[in-house]
């Protein structure tokens, strides 16, 4: 066995190139990036990360340093399931979600990256190797954009090679959402996939009304129509609203996904590898969805997640987020004819530009 010899965590506050907006978080000017660097006794390194929309990142880095490092250092680097259990149960009393889930996710991602680098295998092959080309969509965070800015952003995304677009909904008046989606559908034509995302804005009844009003524009899905805790509400929205439902970016355990899927409250489970428990849990959610004959999509961290959806036969679309993390990554993200391509570099294949990040460190 090769034991884990070192673990470092850091938190960076990263200003966004353009302030973003959605119905729950308001205007977002910066996000926090929490990085984890694992080293084994032979000097191999694995990198993981998680992120927040602006708060809590320093606490997550401290959770990793103070409470997770002692749990994993000295242990066998290849026993990832065992390490995941050790981390989970070490913090279970104050955990089972929230910041703890983000901290465990970042370490778990680093463990899988380390394994891939040690074996000289890309993660998507290590996890099953279904298809490296994954359909991708551009996830606009654009609720407050005036229409002309919304369309300009869309033109940019189409020019970059995207062949599917997501926009925010959840404006103060439903009629505004309807008008914005109508204009977007008109611009995209009848066939280009369009998703809409309400970021939990509505009650179940409001969401049903909104879904019915937006149905004529044929969105692929309505995302996060209401709070993740309202399972019965999701079942009603799906049954009575007439649109498929995507949700999962605010579900932090395998069991939360299991409960919602088994209840029939989601059409496209949408885990985020950086907050659901890492690669270990993300892949279990993919298999769980597959067993219910459901497609799976993803939230955030597209540069990592492309590997995971490339390993899943039930992958639908990869979300490509607008946070601009690529400014701090050494390798450009590859997009060809609307599909993201999982790289063949070992592990997840990402390397951060540490020197560029250094001035932004906050914890
Ligand atoms: Mg979303």
Image: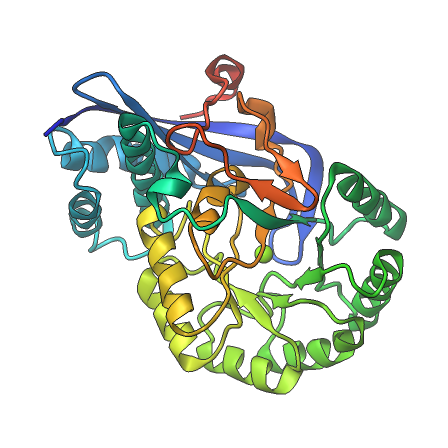
241, above or below 245, in the image: below
Q: How many labels does the image show?
A: 0
Counting from the top left corner in percent of width and height, residue 206 is at: 66, 78
Q: Report the front residue among 268 and 321.
A: 268
Residue 106, x across and y down, in percent: 35, 39
Is there any visible trace of residue 37 in the rendered image? Answer: no
**Residue 77 vs residue 350: left or right?**
left
Outermost residue toward the top? 355
The residue lying toward the viewer, choosing from 339 and 45, is 339
Q: Position of residue 189 (x, y in %)?
A: 86, 61
Report the coloring of the rendering.
Answer: rainbow
29 sits to left or right of 217: left
Query: Quarter of the image holding residue 333?
Result: top right
**Residue nearer the viewer, 227 or 312:** 312
Q: Residue at 38% of width from left, 53% of height from top?
A: 282
Horizontal relation, residue 196 to residue 296: left or right? right
Residue farthest to the front, as pictured: 130
**x 63%, y 45%: residue:** 339
Report x, y in % for residue 253. 34, 59
Q: In the rendered image, which quarter contains the N terminus?
A: top left
Q: Quadrant of the C terminus?
A: top left
Horizontal side of 212 relative to 50 (left or right) equals right
Task: Classify 318 as above or below 332.
Answer: below
Q: Is residue 264 visible?
A: yes
The quarter holding residue 56 reads top left
* Location of ligand 1 given as a quarter of the image: bottom right
Residue at position x 80%, y 76% in the image:
216
Please tell me which residue is depicted at 45% across the width and 73% down the height of the picture: 293
């Amino acid at each position: 066995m090769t034991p884990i010899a070192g673990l470092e965590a850091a938190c960076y506050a990263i200003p966004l190139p353009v302030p973003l907006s959605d119905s729950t978080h308001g205007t977002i000017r910066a996000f926090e990036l929490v990085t984890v660097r694992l080293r084994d006794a032979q000097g191999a390194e694995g990198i993981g990360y998680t992120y927040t929309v602006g708060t809590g990142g320093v606490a997550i880095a401290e959770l990793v340093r103070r409470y997770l490092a002692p749990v994993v250092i000295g242990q066998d680097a290849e026993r990832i399931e065992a390490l995941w259990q050790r981390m989970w149960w070490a913090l279970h009393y104050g955990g089972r979600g929230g910041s703890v889930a983000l901290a465990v996710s970042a370490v778990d991602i680093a463990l899988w990256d380390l394994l891939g680098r040690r074996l000289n295998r890309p993660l998507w092959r290590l996890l099953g190797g279904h298809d490296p080309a994954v359909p991708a969509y551009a996830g606009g965070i654009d609720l407050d954009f005036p229409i002309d800015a919304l369309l300009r952003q869309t033109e940019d995304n189409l020019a970059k090679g995207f062949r599917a677009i997501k926009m925010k909904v959840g404006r103060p008046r439903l009629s505004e959402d309807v008008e914005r989606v109508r204009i977007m559908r008109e611009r995209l034509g009848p066939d280009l996939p369009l998703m809409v995302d309400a970021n939990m804005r509505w009650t179940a009844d409001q969401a049903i009304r909104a879904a019915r009003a937006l149905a004529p524009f044929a969105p692929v899905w309505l995302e996060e129509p209401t709070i993740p805790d309202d399972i019965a509400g999701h079942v009603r929205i799906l049954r009575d609203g007439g649109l498929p439902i995507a949700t999962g970016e605010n579900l932090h355990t395998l069991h939360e996904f299991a409960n919602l899927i088994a209840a029939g409250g989601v059409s496209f489970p949408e885990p985020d590898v950086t907050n659901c428990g890492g690669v270990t849990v993300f892949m279990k959610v993919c298999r769980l969805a597959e067993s219910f004959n459901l497609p799976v999509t993803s939230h955030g961290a597209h540069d990592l997640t492309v590997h995971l959806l490339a390993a899943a036969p039930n992958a639908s679309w990869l979300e490509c987020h607008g946070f601009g993390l690529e400014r701090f990554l050494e390798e450009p993200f590859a997009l060809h004819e609307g599909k993201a391509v999982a790289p063949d570099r070992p592990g997840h294949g990402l390397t951060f530009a540490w020197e560029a990040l250094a001035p932004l460190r906050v914890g």
